[in-house]
Image (cartoon, rainbow, N blue to C red):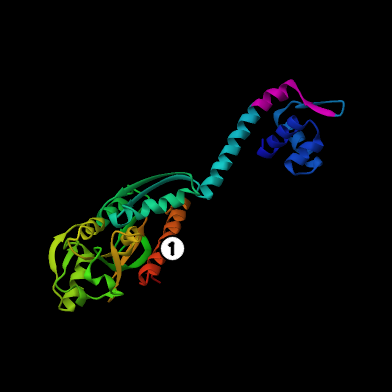
Amino acid sequence: MKIRQLEAFRALVLCQTVTRAAQMLFISQPAVTRLIADLEEDVGFALFERNRGRLYPTAEGLTLFDEVERSLIGVERIARTAQEIKAARVGMLQIAAAPALSLSFLPTAIAAFLKTHQEVNISLTSNTSRAVVDMVMKQRCNVGFVILPMSYPSMLGEPLIAADMVCILPPGHPLSDKHEITPEDLAGERFISNPRDLHSRLEVDALFASFGIERKLQIETQINAGICAFVQAGLGVALIDSITALDYMSGGLIIKRFTPTLRNEFQVLFPSERPPSILVRAFVNHVREFVKSELTKLDALIGCDPASLPA
């Protein structure tokens, strides 16, 4: 018994003529007749009787029709679900991300994604990049976003984007009128830093050391959003990633291009035991395009190289 036979049977019960059933199924009338004959042969009894030019289901046919209707509704539901999966409109996204992405940027990106993927369920966990790598390896999420050097040895993922670091100043700071900030400009400034065990801190310290520039290092905090809060409070200046700076384009901090360029490298990670699903791929592609679009707006504001995807 084949699905096409059952579809022809249902259409003929509903339409009562071969002509209308053929139109409903977009096939020829002989094809409908053949499908019904094959089905009657399979079940071993007559399904229709003719009366005044119309076909009416027999008592046995009506009994079978109820079951066929339920079965075909189930098949159609499966087909719709398969189409929704293919179009990445349903499913569960379990996302783990470093705070630079998870505190503000990813919620904004997710909101844009859900406008066209309304039935997708999402879980977002914030953790350090090292902890996110561990979560991905242990398959506790199906996608992770981290800040790691592109040279970091990983078979789990791929580059997401590389974004310039920018200098942030409190409102009214004497350097506010400068087009771009250099290490020399920050000599003697109170400087808000990340902890010394973070790669970004090591890069920043190495750069200032190479210029022979000393800063007042009094306050440090792990999360860049915390750095921004300290700068807003007038407790110093800082260098942060461009993605965190997106939150302050409309005010609250003064954002300046910093030269020479320091770049934060973001990666997306996938569990190695299974390939990313269609939904995960659709979301990652969305995030990649969304962040490039948002960083272009920041570029227009401060004139820095917004982002580049490594080759």
Which image quarter: residue 191?
Answer: bottom left
Image location of residue 308, percent across then percent down? 39, 70
* Residue pictured at 45% horizontal, 58% vertical: 285
**What SS does tag 1 mark?**
helix
The percent position of residue 42, horizontal first and vertical second, equals: 71, 32
Q: Is residue 64 above or below residue 215?
A: above
Please say whether residue 309 is visible from this viewpoint.
Answer: no
Where residue 122 sits: x, y (%)?
40, 45
Q: Residue furthest bottom?
A: 211
Q: Which residues are magenta?
A: 54-66
Decide: is 187 above or below 194: below
Residue under label 1 = 293
Q: Is residue 174 above or below residue 67?
A: below
> Which quadrant holds the N terminus?
top right
Question: Which amino acid type corresponds to the residue marked 1 in the rendered image?
Answer: Ser
Left or right: where does residue 211 sit relative to residue 55? left
Image position of 119 with respect to 261: above or below = above
Query: Relative to the observer, which residue lies in front, 56 or 215?
Result: 215
Q: Residue at x 45, y 55 (%)?
A: 281
Which percent across, then down, holds residue 28?
79, 43
The residue at 49%/47% (across/down) is 117
User: Which sits in the foreground, 90 or 241?
Assistant: 241
Q: Is residue 65 magenta?
A: yes
Instruction: Tell me the residue at 19%/68% (across/down).
Output: 202
Q: Is residue 264 magenta?
A: no
Q: Which one is nearer the viewer's eye here, 201 or 85?
A: 201
